[in-house]
Amino acid sequence: MAKAYNSKVRRRGFQVGDLVLRRADATKNLGKLDAKWKGPYQVTGVIGSGTYKLQKDGWQRSPTHLEHR
């Protein structure tokens, strides 16, 4: 079943300047009505496979791993 699903998943990357949403922290208990996503953030650098530097409103974030969903 996983093989069939994974065969149709398209990998995509982000370029510098793209706007992305970041999943809210999984470590915090989110309520039913809390936002599941934060952002938008601007990609300011590509570090590795799925790891990007993000910036929002002039504040630089530490490198963040983004899953392509």
Image (cartoon, rainbow, N blue to C red):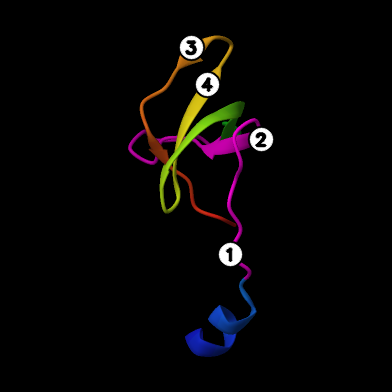
Q: Amino acid at mark 1?
A: Arg
Residue 45 picture location, percent across and down: 49, 32
Which residue in the structure is indicated by mark 4? 55
Could you tell which of marks 4 and 1 lies nearer the N-terminus? 1
Label 1 belongs to which residue? Answer: 11
Residue at image coords 49%, 52%: 67
Q: Amino acid at mark 2?
A: Asp
Q: Considering the numbered disc 2 on the image, is that residue within a helix, a strand or a loop?
A: loop
Mark 3 vs 1, N-terminal side: 1
User: What range is drawn magenta here?
Assistant: 10-32
Residue 8 part of the magenta-drawn span: no
* Secondary structure under the numbered disc 4 in the rendered image: strand
> In this orientation, which residue lies closer to the viewer: 58 or 34?
58
Q: Is residue 56 above or below residue 9?
A: above
Q: Residues within 10 Å of mark 3 (few under 14, many from 20)?
A: few
* Circle 4: residue type: Gln
Please provide percent x and percent y for residue 10.
63, 69
Residues under numbered marks 3 and 4 in contact, where contact means CB atoms less than 8 Å apart: yes
Q: Which residue matches tag 3?
A: 59
Disc 2 crowd rating (10 Å Cα; few below 14, some 14-19, many 20+) is few
Tag 4–tag 1 contact (CB < 8 Å): no
Disc 1 to disc 2, C-alpha distance: 16 Å
Kindly state the secondary structure of the residue where label 3 is placed. strand
